[in-house]
Amino acid sequence: MSEERIAILGGSGLSRLDALEVERRKIVVTPYGEPSAPLTFGTFDDLPIVFLPRHGEAHTIPPHQVNYRANLWALHSVGVKEVVSVASVGGITCPPETLCVPDQIIDYTWGREHTYVESGVTPVSHVDFTQPYCQALRRRLLEAGRKAGVEVLDGGTYGATQGPRLETAAEVRRMKNDGCDLVGMTGMPEAALARELDLCFAHLTLTVNWAAGIDGASISMEEIRQVLENSIESVRRIIGCL
Ligand code: HPA
């Protein structure tokens, strides 16, 4: 069955969507292997959605081992046209507890299965990625933030790193010089694969810590957990206003 629902790709802190009224779940087999979890179809505050937790339902899949190709393919195969990707990030210019809808990406990842274009399998093609995000969906997210009464920053550059380790202070300094505002480990190749499938894709990021070296302190997992706990409700409210 083909579905024109919006997909929510959940990140750290959003492996489950409480208050999602589940209608059904679907295991999707793709030519690229298994997605991170079965797709969950349901309604969230009356909005019909498909939910997929990118790190798996028990948060066991690290960023460099997420099967991004299978995840996006699975969503596309059930007729999804729009994907909101929720991601927790380190802040280079955006402080902890800030929500942001970035407008640019720099990709520092390596060795990931990052494209559907394959010699002998698909035609050679080069998607336009000048604007890596879908502007209409970005606007919809920003509007949802206004409706939800949650401040959401408009714009910013997401730097995608390989993980799973956090960055060194020098790496973050370089990223800052490059113009990055946020650093996360899952934004690529997710966004580029979505573009190859012609999906309308946007990020909603939650800054959970200052990136390495920015405030001079080392990064505490306890701090990250606290921020996630305090702020994930704002993310849920925004999704409910989409
Ligand atoms: N770096 C990379 N990814 C992250 C961070 C960070 O500091 N915080 C949350 N995700």
Image: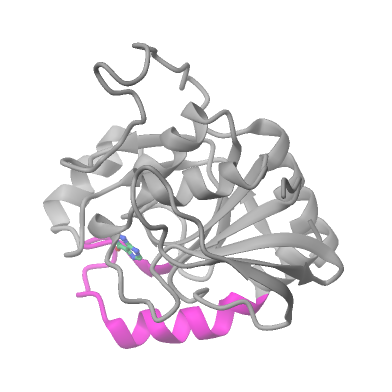
List x then y, in percent, for residue 88.
44, 64
26 relative to 187, above or below: below
Q: Which colour scheme is used?
A: one colour
72 relative to 55, above or below: above
Image quadrant in which the C terminus is located: bottom right
Residue at image position (50%, 57%) is 28
List x then y, in percent, for residue 143.
79, 50
- Please identify the quarter of the rendering in which residue 103 is found: top right
Asked if the stretch drawn in magenta spans residue 20, the answer is no
Magenta range is 208-233
Residue 223 horizontal side relative to residue 10, left or right? left
Residue at image position (65%, 78%) is 233
Residue at image position (58%, 43%) is 77
Residue 233 horizontal side relative to residue 191, left or right? right
Q: Nearer the viewer, residue 203 or 214?
A: 203
Q: Nearer the viewer, residue 3 or 226?
A: 3
Q: Name the quadrant where ligand 1 sits.
A: bottom left
List x then y, in percent, for residue 40.
62, 68
158 relative to 97, above or below: above
Asked if the stretch drawn in magenta spans residue 212, the answer is yes
List x then y, in percent, for residue 162.
21, 51
